[in-house]
Image: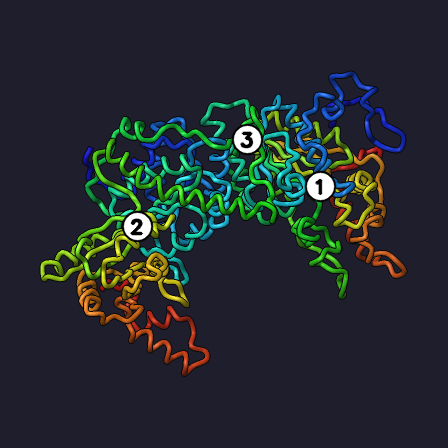
Amino acid sequence: MSYQPVKFYQTGTFTVGNRLLAPVERSVQQSERRSNSINSGHRACQGCGEALGARYAIDAAMAASNGQLIAANATGCLEVFSTPYPESSWQVPWIHSLFGNTPAVATGIAAAMKVKGRKEVRVVAQGGDGGTADIGFGCLSGMFERNDDVLYICYDNQGYMNTGVQRSSATPPAARTATTMPVGPEPGNVFGQGKNLPEIAMAHGIPYVATATVADLRDLEYKVKRAMNVHGARYLHIFVPCPLGWGSQSNDTIRLARLAKETGLFPVFEARHGEVTGVLKIRRKQAVEEYLKPQRRFAHLFGNDPHTEVIARIQAIADRNIRKYNLLDEEG
Amino acid sequence: MLKQIEGSLAVAEAVALCRPEVICAYPISPQTHIVEGLGKMVKAGKLAPCEFINVESEFAAMSVAIGASAAGARAYTATASQGLLFMAEAVYNAAGLGLPIVMTIANRAIGAPINIWNDHSDALSQRDSGWIQLFAETNQEALDLHIQAFRLAEELSMPVMVCMDGFILTHAYERVDMPTQQQVDAYLPPFDPRQVLDPKEPVSIGAMVGPEAFMEVRYLEHARQLQALERIPQLAVQFKEIFGRASGGLTQTYCADDAETMIVAMGSVLGTIKDTIDEMRAEGHKIGVLGITSYRPFPLAQVREALIHAKRFVVLEKSLAVGMGGILATDVRMALSGAGLHGYTVVAGLGGRAITKKSLHQLFRHAVKDELEPITFLDLDWNVVNKQLERERQNRHSGPIAENILHDLGVVSAKFG
């Protein structure tokens, strides 16, 4: 479903080489005219998926709005690492109010722009999975329901990383966090809980919902662009690995994001008005072990006495996603 | 123009005359009629350009106002009671960010037990939030204070609460003098924000501030409140020049010049107190009143000046610092530190308990003879209290308090003295 049908891959990756494309087809990020919305010097960890995702997303939104963008930001890693006083990485007008009110703050900004007649100015709101799925959920649902003209971006690293890696309602089953420790008869986060935010967003019938990962930044840029071409409430859920919280190597961030998609654990799709209109197919299906093993938060599932039944339950989740979203090509 | 109109609708019309640009609405009694009135005007296109947003909670109401104000729009909302508590985090945030939002508080008790009637617990719970808090005595004053509030808020870049007694004022039909649009426009210039989110000149608002600068940022909030102490009286003078009536200011006094006994209060109860004092004055008692209009900033100097020549003062307040006593009384005592006056605290009217002239006569007559206890709970039914205390002594499983008391009273209805 990518708008770029040509597929030139760098060796060992699925990354499209920009140099092989016509200038008009190249990514926003490769251009020297990119806006550097989140400038260098911020305090994100090495290999932070959120910093990467936010940079691509906001730069793409800046490109799509001709630089007429205002951003609201929830409390969380992104807010903290980008604005330790007296420094700010933000090259766009940016506001942080609270942890749980970012969609409503964005609604207020959009309303102000409307009454001021500033139709060209667009509004994005952004937060982590805790700020989105948990504490900000009421405000998010309200913003969706009113179809306010806001693009909300959730950077999903599957836990409260800023406060020291606690469970959120986006934490996957079996994962170790500081509040779901790998002890007792059912170590790690329990099965059968959690929220599927993209599907909840779709249930509001809003014009555009999409998921993306930092493994496919071209697709991420494309979805931001698509979202910015629509008015009303829009939701973009970006999968962003967290080396600190997941216990993964910082140079594995892209690989883990790709494996989340290639295993089927994180379906990459887009939807309009509550209906799925396209999915990013799995190119080379991987077993969930390949995704789980490099992460220490799942280390208790492996070792000398592996929890094969738990791994099988996680595989079942991936397989269900593959069926539900039709993630495999028929021939594939 | 003179009008006979409900307090809430008078406030709605006054807010409309202030040309609000974003109004956030969430229903809670007894505030609801205000935003209903505004919603109708916006829907009819009378306030264009103005966005009226039906939000999903008070927390969202204040948050939408924060976003709108930070983006340069004149933002307004109204709430009460539980609603104010539910938005408390955003209330502090609006003040910390220095956003000149104006909010009406239709003062109402806080549960449990749930109670929709008037007292000042809600607003006073937010007294340290950094908001200016103005208390109206009458509907006319409530109306006028809103016009002054926008001017004050935007001049100083800080938020203002206008507090009016729920039901007693919000639902009372009174005669008010509604100003003209020309008068309000002459008094209230367009909003010229000190900081604004604008792609033309990107700024970061709400950055994380550590120990190296937090105290300074917090002190600046305090400094703005001190500036408000200067500006509030000046704005009242300018208001009189344009609108032709005195309204607002930090404090007001009544029969205070030779008073030996001074009663201190806020809000609509001042009317009942003044009536009582008129009658006592006729009998020769030297008694007067100090009304606090600006509770935050608290006018320490003006309060001291108004009370220092009296022999005693009685703070009658519709609030209770549970485990301590009075809230307003504590502030008044602060204003009088070092002065040798007898001071009495009277907690009255909680949860809408009527404050009657009869009770006030009795209270004030004890006060002028220095026969009051340090703290009095006006018209508290000691039988009910003692019965419940005894029940709790006797029975570990004495059950829910409110239900027990309602059972003892035998009537499930509000008690009007």
Q: Give above or below for B386 relative to A84.
A: below
Marks 2/3 same chain:
no
* Residue that numbered label 3 is attached to: A232
Q: Quadrant of residue A27?
A: top right
Q: Label 2 marks which chain's residue? A: B
Say whether residue A120 is left or right of residue A27: left
Q: Mark 2 and 1 residues: CB-CB less than 8 Å, in contact?
A: no
Provide the secondary structure element on which disc 1 rests: loop
* Residue that numbered label 1 is attached to: A43
Q: Label 1 marks which chain's residue? A: A
Provide the secondary structure element on which disc 2 rests: helix
Q: Quadrant of residue B185?
A: top left
Q: Give above or below for B20 relative to A129.
A: above
Query: Marks 2 and 3, Cα distance to the nearest angstrom?
Result: 52 Å
Q: Where is the C terminus of chain A found, in terms of image quarters? A: top right
Which residue sits at x=83%, y=19%? A20
Which residue sits at x=34%, y=52%? B300
Q: Residue furthest bottom?
A: B394
Q: Say which label, 1 or 3, has the lower sequence index.
A: 1
How far from the left and from the top, in percent, is residue A283? 83, 34
* Residue that numbered label 2 is attached to: B302
Q: Amino acid at mark 1?
A: Arg
Say whether residue A98 is left or right of residue A158: left
The numbered disc on residue B386 is none
Marks 1/3 same chain:
yes
